Image (cartoon, rainbow, N blue to C red):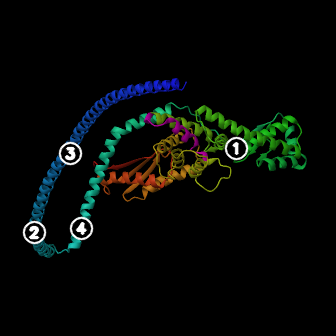
Amino acid sequence: MLTSIIIATITFLTGAGIAAVFFVANNKKNAKKIESEVELLKKNKLIEVKEQFIALKAEHEQQVQQRNSKIQSTEARLQQREMQLNQRQGEIQRKVHETEVVKESFDVQLHALEAKKKELESITRRAQEQLETISGLSAEKAKESLIESLKDEAKTNAMSYVNDIMEEAKMTANKEAKKIIIQSIQRVATETAIENSVTVFHIESDEIKGRIIGREGRNIRALEAATGVEIIVDDTPEAIVLSAFDPVRREIARLSLHQLVTDGRIHPARIEEVVNKVRRQVEEELVEIGKRTTIDLGVHGLHPELVRLVGKMKYRSSYGQNLLQHARETANLCATMASELGLNPKKAKRAGLLHDIGKVPDDEPELPHAILGMRLAEKYKEKPDICNAIGAHHDEVEMETLIAPVVQACDAISGARPGARREIVEAYIKRLNDLENLALSYPGVLKTYAIQAGRELRVIVGADKLDDKETELLSFDLAKKIQDEMTYPGQVKITVIRETRAVSFAK
């Protein structure tokens, strides 16, 4: 049993040894193989590292070469700039040297010039003394005499020159200006002024007069107190006269009377009620008239208060000309003239409609209506050119835009056309007398005549007192003085007549 165990053990150990020997032999082979593979891998890695090193070295050499080329180009540019600076420095030094030479020459010339100036002054002084001795006049008196003679000659020449310029301007501009104005007038329809300061209220019978007067006159007194209108009840058949300077008040009184007479109930309490009701209706009517006017003219975006004031123009008049009609006419004229001149017709029409808005304010301060209208327009946010045109249409402020003279001209056209306005006789006669007296105040004037309703002034001068040049000067001075000192519609033509007569007798 032991023997078999030993034999088995020896057998096992022998097999294990042989296996170990085979294992060791195999490991040696594998190790050699691994070593050969490692050597091969090492060689490959060395080759890759060498290739990378060569590539990096080449790239580095290329960068170094580029940097060297940049440095060389920079050095070349710096050398070129240094050469240019050296050249400029040389030029500057040369110019400085030349300047110093010129300065020295200039100083020498200046000293010589000063010497010649002193010599010339002494020669002039000696010559002046000799002239004073020969002429017997001092230098100041001779200068004054020369200035006077030159002044007269210059005045005559200037007058002739002004006349030539005016004639030339008339030839070129007068024709076009007349054409524009005539076209503007012809394209606008006009009406004749018929406004009065009284309104006649017609009644069916004279019995109503007693009811309007009332017991002891209480009805008529209440009506006058409520409306501010003087009611004249006289022997005129079937008519009652309403008198007031304010057309709005007259209209309120007329409508109130109409309602009272139609209703038949006439007593103080009823009168106050009707007058208040009619006053509110008239205010609404003013707004409606203003809106209708702006729509008809195509003027949009007005402030409601300006629209009300436009409607209020219907019940105002200027020299008998209805103010609303005048404003509409001026607006249409402005639009037409602005179109002819190449300006904005909408702005011109707006300014023409509002130019007399200062005549219908609610409080009526002591200001010219043009200035007041300009302030109202500014208050209600109108544009500056519109405000300037309103304020400048009577020259109260300076004109700043081209619309302003258009509004001024169209206002004059509308107010000065035949039948537009009715002047008071006394004012008309006074204007004519002032025209004649103004011309008579000039020396050499013998007679003056204002003709054509003050549109022309004829001045007769003495032929022995004024010559032709002085006659032209008189005409020019008269026109300027009338323009500066007098107020008149349209324009005034000044004709100066110098007549020479030769009289002899046959015996």
Predominant secondary structure, magenta span: helix
Q: Residue at x 88, y 41 (%)?
A: 266
Q: Alpha-carbon distance for marks 1 and 2? A: 91 Å
Q: What is the number of the mark on residue 145?
A: 4
Task: Return the residue nearer the eye: 302 or 355.
Answer: 302
Task: Return the residue nearer the eye: 113 or 280.
Answer: 113
Q: Quadrant of the N terminus?
A: top right
Q: Alpha-carbon distance for marks 4 and 1? A: 66 Å
Q: Amino acid at mark 1?
A: Pro
Task: Return the residue nearer the eye: 60 or 285.
Answer: 60
Q: Which residues are magenta?
A: 340-357
Q: Which residue is mark 2?
A: 104
**Residue 342 is covered by the magenta coloring:** yes
Please report contact status of discs 2 and 3: CB closer than 8 Å, yes or no. Answer: no
Mark closer to the chain start, 1 or 2: 2
| x and y, in percent, of residue 22 in the image | 38, 25
The secondary element bearing badge 2 is classed as helix
Q: Alpha-carbon distance for marks 3 and 1? A: 98 Å
Q: Amino acid at mark 2?
A: Glu
Q: Residue at x 46, y 24 (%)?
A: 11
